[in-house]
Amino acid sequence: MPTNRDQWPAHIQERYPQPGKPWFLVVVAAIFVLVIGAFVTTGIARVINPPLSEKLLTWDIKDKKNVEVIFEITRPIDMNVWCLIRAQDFYMTDIGYAILEFPQDGADYKQINYVLKTASEAFTVEVINCDKDPNSTLFTAPQFAPGVEIPQQDPPAVNSGK
């Protein structure tokens, strides 16, 4: 039997009509591709231009009770931001803790130099996170050792961990 459909006998061509395009499957596949493309595009855009990001640039021990922390934040110009920074000792217990407030000021980039007061000499300093909510669940609770006198922080700190 010939493989070219046009060469088939008439009664076979009637029994097995020419199949049409599966338009339903084409439409479903197109919608699927568009939805996946939208998710991928949104994800890539958020990775390239995150709405809020923070980065620790450097820190320097000024003396046994003070650490200078330099970090940067990138944010939308109309967003108030709070950032948690902390210093820890060799045993990884907190010796300095501050949630800093940065009200909107029309700038999307800000470099911050802040002197964090500590209970003793710092072993490490971290910018834990920044968020648009001062009561964010992203801000870990302070972990001072029992009996440590928690240092009161200077503005723009709104919480010293007390």
Image (cartoon, rainbow, N blue to C red):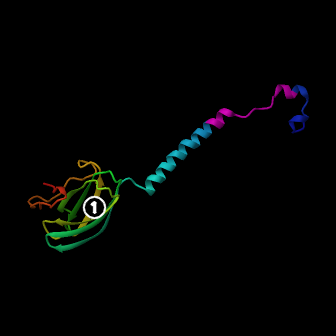
Rate crowding at label 1 as few (under 14), some (14 to 19) or many (20 or more) other CA atoms within 10 Å: many
Residue situated in front as seen by the camera: 9 or 137: 137
Residue at x 16%, y 71% (from the top left corner): 121
Residue at x 57%, y 42% (from the top left corner): 34
Residue 122 in view here: no
Q: Which residues are magenta?
A: 12-27
The quadrant of the image that shows the C terminus is: bottom left
* Residue 57 shown left or right of residue 60 in the figure: right
Whether residue 24 appears in magenta in the rendering, the answer is yes
Name which residue type carries label 1: Val
Residue 96 in view here: yes
* Residue 24 shown left or right of residue 94 in the figure: right
Element under disc 1: strand
The quadrant of the image that shows the N terminus is: top right
Q: Is residue 57 above or below residue 129?
A: below
Q: Is residue 129 above or below residue 133?
A: below
Residue situated in front as seen by the camera: 147 or 45: 45
Q: Is residue 145 above or below residue 18?
A: below
Residue situated in front as seen by the camera: 16 or 104: 104
Whether residue 101 appears in magenta in the rendering, the answer is no
Q: Name the image quarter holding residue 69.
A: bottom left
> Where's residue 50, x and y in %?
40, 54
* Residue 153 shown left or right of residue 2 in the figure: left
Q: Name the image quarter holding residue 144.
A: bottom left
> Where's residue 133, x and y in %?
27, 48
Residue at x 21%, y 64% (from the top left corner): 87
The residue indicated by pointer 1 is 127
> Where's residue 41, x and y in %?
51, 50
> Where's residue 119, x and y in %?
12, 65
